[in-house]
Amino acid sequence: MGRPLGAREIALKALHRAEMGDVPPRAALDAFFRRYACGDRDRAFATEMVYGTIRWRRRLDWMLGQLMRGNPESLTPWIRHIIRMGLYQLMMLDRVPDAAATHESVQLARRYGHEGTVRLVNAILRTAVRKRDLLERPASGEDPVTALGVTHSYPPWLTKRWIERYGVEAAAALMEAGNRTPPLSIRVNTSRSTPRDLAETLKLQEIPVEPGLWLDDFLSIRHAGNLRRLPAHEAGLFQVQDESAGLAVRLLGPKPGETVVDLCCAPGGKTTYIAQIVGAGGRVIACDTSLHRLRRVEENRRRMGLGQVRLVGMDGRSPGVDFAADRVLVDVPCSGLGTIARRPDLRWRRKAEDLDRLRVEQQALLESGAGLVKRGGVLVYSTCTIEPEENEEVVAAFCGRHPGFRLEEPGDWPGDLAGVLDGAGRVATLPSTHGVDGSFAARFRRDG
């Protein structure tokens, strides 16, 4: 355990690690939380600083460009992060006094810069306070791609494609949804508890709980701490999981006693949900290419008491197994652009060319999964992205090559879930419309 650091310094170190080491911000934060003594309040503030600064990076850099005479790119990464953090506190966090935000930023500049950068940080932040009203957003005369991209802090390529697909108003709504911190969603392990009992248990610990938006075995909660430290989690009573992931499993429609293959299973959220449904008499073959990630599946399986899960380490594109499964889920690696609200760094990490690269792997995995489905069985392809190259286009190409598989709408689909299902057996969610992560899933039936 290292010396105690303030929340802002931990946030600064995590931002630097995330950018320079290409590390997810959550992993960077957790590493520093383990290394330095840090209370729950400081953890929460450091997390807010990291995620907020990453989420609003383009808008903050636009503000910096208005306040700085030179080129912001000439600044060292440390100083650039310090200024972004300072501007985030001044412009977007009402609860932080201007004096505190400025003073603490200057103190960080003393530790991670020199006297010149100390004066620069001080001058920029003091000017930002005086000119706050002029830094709200770009002038209305800017083109929509620039105006929306800066205002909502998204890269130009993603802003442009969403405007072209959805129109300016709907694209803005989608961007706004991606900038709202979403509530946490958990799935109740119904083999050990009920939604009502778990909700009462959490309320006794003063954790606000509400029913899920779409699924009756999910709960929505607000909790600033680490959910995985809660006794109910350690006892295997729930799994942290967005409802959009649950909708893909519901579309798969596993039945008690069936054999189901989860071809890309890690970290195991969908695997354990399937296992709950097939019950002790069923079997779930959980496959993944990463042994490290499979260990996470095993941890979840053990914690939740789901002995019907069998783990297999393999590359799903060339499976070394021979199954005739009742159902196969192919939950492919994807751009994750439906999860930007939870993972704001993805908007900066992803590039337009990634979509075509990912599609090649997605098509290969879907082909492999199809070979594991018995005649008359069900195949589901799912992603956590909203981009057509990874969704509709993959499905259309598969249907063109495999006339023995047909898209179908499940006959027992509940009426209260009709809002996420089209007439061709496909689930599609948008954060701005459905209140959950953006996702896609398509269901096929193999001819008997």
Image (tube, grey):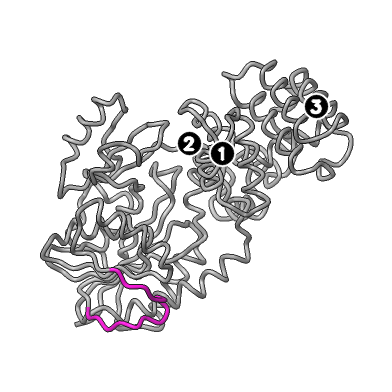
- Stretch of the chain drawn in magenta: 311-324
- Tell me if 147 is positioned left or right of 221 in this view: right
For the residues labelled 3 and 1, the Cα–Cα distance comes to 22 Å
- Residue at 25% of width from left, 27% of height from top? 203
Relative to 32, say whether 351 is above or below: below
The disc label shown at residue 420, or none: none
Q: Where residue 145 appears, x then y in whole percent?
A: 68, 47
Label 1, residues with CA under 10 Å away: few <14, some 14-19, many ≥20: many
Label 2 belongs to which residue? 181
Do the CB atoms of the residues marked 1 and 2 lie less than 8 Å apart? yes
Q: CA distance from mark 2 to mark 3?
A: 28 Å
Percent of width and height locating residue 210: 28, 32
The spot of residue 234 in percent (x, y) is 27, 43
Residue 312 on the magenta segment: yes
Mark 3 lies on residue: 124
Q: Residue at x 31, y 58 (%)?
A: 248
Residue, x 25% and y 74% (percent of image)?
Answer: 445
| Residue placed most toward the observer, 1 or 53 | 1
Q: Secondary structure at mark 2?
A: loop
Foreground residue among 240 and 163: 240
Residues at marks 1 and 2, CA–CA distance in whole angstroms? 9 Å
Q: Earlier in the sequence, mark 3 or mark 1?
A: 1
Q: Amino acid at mark 2?
A: Thr
**Of the image marks 1 and 2, the number of the one nearer the N terminus:** 1
Of labels 1 and 2, the one closer to you: 1
Q: Residue 252 at x, y = what percent?
A: 26, 63
Q: Residue at x 30, y 64 (%)?
A: 425
